[in-house]
Amino acid sequence: HHIKSSIIQRPLHKAVLRSGIPKAIGFHTFRYLFATHLQDAGFDICIVQEFLRHRDVKTTIVYTHALKLGGLGVQISIDRI
């Protein structure tokens, strides 16, 4: 079941304040970190797109640019086995 984001936002905000992190952190930050981690681990951009439920791969490619890998910097997940 889905839960309302407002239920988690307040505890997240409190945790960020207690951690001493000087920047604002929200749910999008965690999505970005998750996508970046997957791409850094070598997952194919299409797999990352599926995980993030993006309709257009162009939206997902934004995360690739953050790693400065370009389209050639990712592998398909089978390559890691």
Image (cartoon, helix red, strand yellow):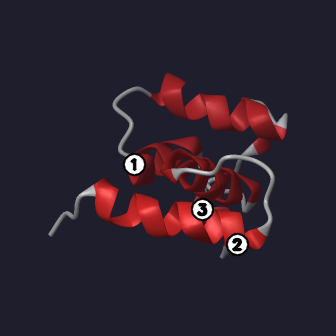
Sequence order check: which comes first, mark 1 or mark 2?
A: 2
Q: Is residue 5 left or right of residue 66?
A: left
Furthest-right residue in this view: 68
Sequence order check: which comes first, mark 2 or mark 3?
A: 2
Circle 1 sits on which residue? 50
Q: CA distance from mark 2 to mark 3?
A: 37 Å
Find residue 16 and report its horizontal and vertical position in percent: 66, 64
Q: CA distance from mark 1 to mark 2?
A: 33 Å
Q: Quadrant of the N terminus?
A: bottom left
Q: Is residue 37 left or right of residue 20?
A: left
Circle 3 sits on which residue? 77
Comparing 63 with 21, the one in front is 21
Q: Quadrant of the C terminus?
A: bottom right
Q: Nearer the viewer, mark 1 or mark 2?
A: 2
Q: CA distance from mark 1 to mark 3?
A: 13 Å
- Any mark on residue 38, and which? none
Furthest-left residue in this view: 1
Comparing 73 with 15, the one in front is 15
Classify mark 2: residues with Cα within 10 Å, few (<14), some (14-19) or many (20+). Answer: few
Q: Nearer the viewer, mark 2 or mark 3?
A: 2
Query: What is the secondary structure assignment of the residue under circle 3?
Result: helix
Circle 2 sits on which residue? 18
Which amino acid, mark 3? Ser
Query: What is the secondary structure assignment of the residue under circle 1?
Result: helix
Q: Nearer the viewer, mark 1 or mark 3?
A: 1
The residue at 22%/64% (across/down) is: 3
Which amino acid, mark 2? Arg
Q: Is residue 17 left or right of residue 20?
A: left
Find residue 10 and report its horizontal and vertical position in percent: 44, 62
The residue at 69%/59% (across/down) is: 37
Which amino acid, mark 1? Glu
Sequence order check: which comes first, mark 1 or mark 3?
A: 1
